[in-house]
Amino acid sequence: MIPKKLQQKLEERKANNALRYLGTPSNLIDFSSNDYLGFSKSETIFNKTHAFLVGHNMTQNGATGSRLLSGNHTLYPITENIISNFHNSQSALMFNSGYDANIGLFSSVPQRNDVILYDEFAHASIRDGISMSHATAYKFMHNDLEDLERHLVRCRQISKETTMYIVTESVFSMDGDSPDLKALVTISKKHQAHVIIDEAHAVGVFGKNGAGLVQELELEQYIFARIITFGKALGCHGAAILGSEPLKAYLINFARSFIYTTGLPPHSLATIQFAYQELTDTKIRHKLHQNIHYFKSEITKNNIENIFIESHSVIQCCIISGNDLVKSIAKKLQDHQFDVKPIVSPTVPKGKERLRFCLHSYNTKKDISAVLNLLATFIN
């Protein structure tokens, strides 16, 4: 048995139809995974990775330790150099996951008496990292730059010397929308604040060769740190923080999620290298953007724009309030062989429950039309 308080929390989740379960693999048509380009199933990437490792006599299964001890094998500096060059950054420091990267960055970089201003819809990993920091944190209204600037002005009035950080995402994971990054950078320069942007859902999708939204807008030089992940469009695992060489040196010394963990094995790093090579194939990303455009046109055709959040990304969400109702409609879609997941409270605010459609280069127009036609039928 577990303690009574823990059991009560589980019972509360059950009562709200919000209890999470681990699912099992299915053969349903994929509208739920983060494998936007199909790289996780790419035989080309798999075979190139295998041939590279065998050809270089790299047959070890693990890194053997943290990177500061025995785990900094030869592929690490090579891969980080590839990543930093690709993303037009001074440096790249790899972490074992996007969660680890955000925990490491936000728990160590902002100092006592610093101020963090973060979008209210920021990812849980960002929030968790901020909660471990000694800085003072305030959230601003989602993508509301006027509200952000009000916070900046107020903080500057309190202290002209305070170090301030603005934190947002280039594509939000639960809404699929984006802030006006150019205007945000202008505001940050006006108030002398450091900008940190999580690009998890933009890398592989936006920018030249999928380099991300920051590079598409040519804002790299104005961003203090970018967080990129490899478990989404790149179809593998791990993450990196892009920034200056001094920032990299600082993280190596003070980011606990970097210091106190076993490194990634050679196989993971080789896979990342060949995933980046595949990004230069523009045909796959072109097909992905065609599918995004077609999905949005089918939303209009089915006259259901009013329930969808405006988004030009791979993430398209429709609001269906209530855990019971959104789960019921998701189940109906799954019964018709479409893997569409419900996002329920408390993951999103109560009343903002939704179906989350993730689009891919391998989705067909026939399937896109069919799933949205069914959705329109079920909600009417």
Image (cartoon, rainbow, N blue to C red):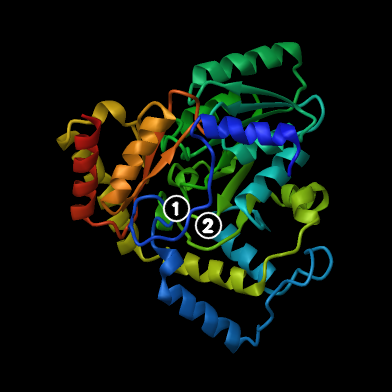
As rendered, which of 13 and 72 lies closer to the eye? Answer: 13
What is the x, y in percent for residue 327?
39, 37
Q: Quadrant of the N terminus?
A: top right
The structure residue drawn at horizontal position 48% and vertical position 60%, both measured from the top left corner, is 234
The structure residue drawn at horizontal position 47% and vertical position 40%, both measured from the top left corner, is 173
Q: From the viewer's perspective, is residue 306 above or below residue 360?
A: above
Residue tagged by mark 2? 231
As rendered, which of 75 and 127 lies closer to the eye? Answer: 127
In the rendered structure, the answer to whether residue 63 lies left or right of residue 43 reads right
Q: Which residue is outermost to the left? A: 301
As rendered, which of 57 and 219 lies closer to the eye? Answer: 57
The structure residue drawn at horizontal position 19% and vertical position 41%, both measured from the top left corner, is 373
Q: Quadrant of residue 377?
A: top left
Q: From the viewer's perspective, is residue 49 above or below residue 121?
A: below
**Residue 66 seen:** yes
**Residue 346 seen:** no
Q: Residues within 10 Å of mark 2 (few under 14, many from 20)?
A: many
Q: Quadrant of the C terminus?
A: top left
Helix, strand or loop at disc 1? loop
What distance separates the C-alpha of mark 2 from that of mark 1?
Answer: 8 Å
**Callout 1, which amino acid?**
Asn
Q: Quadrant of residue 11?
A: top right
**Callout 2, which amino acid?**
Gly
Mark 2 and mark 1 residues within 8 Å of each other at the beta carbon: yes
In the rendered structure, the answer to whether residue 16 lies left or right of residue 75 reads left
Residue tagged by mark 1? 34
Q: Which residue is outermost to the front? A: 1
The structure residue drawn at horizontal position 58% and vertical position 14%, both measured from the top left corner, is 150
What is the x, y in percent for residue 142?
50, 25
What is the x, y in percent for residue 290?
25, 51
Q: Residues within 10 Å of mark 1 (few under 14, many from 20)?
A: many
